[in-house]
Amino acid sequence: MKNLRTFLTGLLSLTATMLWAADYQVDGQFVTIPVKQVKADGAQVVRLQVVNDNIIRVQATSKAQLPEKQSLMIVKQTQKPKFTVKEDGDVVSVKAANVEARVDGNTGHITFFDANGKQLLKEAKDGKQFWDFTVPERELGMKTGYTVPEEQKHGLSWQMKFDSPDDEAFYGLGQHQSEEFNMKGKNEDLFQYNTKVSIPFVLSNKNYGILWDSYSYCRFGNPHDYLQLNRAFKLYDKNGKSGHLTGTYIDAQGKKLVRDEDSIYYEYGTPAKSEIALKTDNGGIKNFPKDINLMGANVTYEGFIEPMANNYQLSIINLSFIIPAM
């Protein structure tokens, strides 16, 4: 692979004295573009930093200015590569030796090109979105008696989307348990857990890479939260009755129990989105039936699922598993 272009994205900060020129400002290796037509949850400011001949770092925020914070991922950059800045109508172009970034001053949308002007990556419509976020008390993780200042509990949750051609492949994201190599069209939650090692970096077969400056829990692919089965689909039992599946439990001695199941989720701390969960104090394992010995039992869920959207056919579901004896 020839010169690899890498784009760094994230919400970082830099403090410096800046001089405005037309619809952008240049300060050292930084070019800051204020967005003219700010949308709800969209970016107000976009900043580009030319890191070296192959890397342009992107910073953006939905606030009036970038926050003053030090990245835990990206070290201070000392190189001062040459680059040019050009304004063509509403588009501000920042060009290094081997990579160019063009920012639409109206929308803040970014498109990347190689040294020959070939498009590498284009931000999708509504590609950058931000939401205010407050860390719940239960997730602060402080056990030393230290009280977290109120201002440190608040931040932004953000999403970035790019257009990608059908023949593109993405590799990376670290070490995961999904046994997937090409992550195009796949979903992956990024967090550290046992043998799961997450690295927020992907390499494209189109000769570029993306590193996003985030050491928080994040998702690659579908950004939406997980839902209980009955919130994502219309459910029908094996006889066609709506509202649930049919769950059949047969223990090791042949005792049989049949009941309605509106979800298939028994992990501890079930989100309060299932009727069963609501009746059992949110405890996932408490959702298991009480009147049967599950050690060595065979459990089968049967029925039909129908997507909430129209123009889809009913799908038959028949899941079966055995709970091993310990």
Image: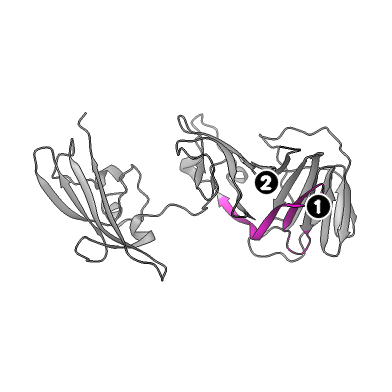
Magenta stretch holds residue 109: yes
Q: Residue at x 65, y 59 (%)?
A: 124
In this image, 94 relative to 63: left or right?
A: right
Image quarter (top left, top right, bottom left or bottom right) of the C terminus: top left
Q: Is residue 192 left or right of residue 276?
A: right
Relative vertical location of residue 3 with respect to residue 66 in this rendering, above or below:
above
Q: Which residue was labeled with disc 1?
A: 117
> Does residue 129 sit above or below 179 in this rendering?
below
- Name which residue lies at 73% across and 55% down: 110
Q: Amino acid at mark 1?
A: Gly
Quick check: can you spot residue 62? no
Work out which residue is located at the far bottom of the displayed protein and give it: 310
User: Taken as a whole, is the magenta stretch helix, strand or loop?
Assistant: strand
Q: Residues within 10 Å of mark 1 (few under 14, many from 20)?
A: few
Rendered image: mark on residue 100: none
Which residue appears at 23% of the width and 37% of the height? 323
Give 59 or 89, whichever is nearer the viewer.
Answer: 89
The answer to whether 81 is drawn above or below residue 238 in the figure is above
Residue named by callout 2: 206
Most foreground residue, 286 or 318: 318
- Of the numbered discs 1 and 2, the one sitting upstream in the chain is 1
User: Which secondary structure lies at badge 2?
Assistant: loop
Q: Magenta segment: does it hold 168?
A: no
The span shown in magenta is 104-133
Quadrant of the rendering where the N terminus is positioned: top right
Gap in Å between the C-alphas at discs 1 and 2? 14 Å
Question: How far from the left and from the top, in percent, is residue 34?
Answer: 79, 58
Give the amino acid at mark 2: Lys
Query: Which image quarter: residue 198?
Result: top right
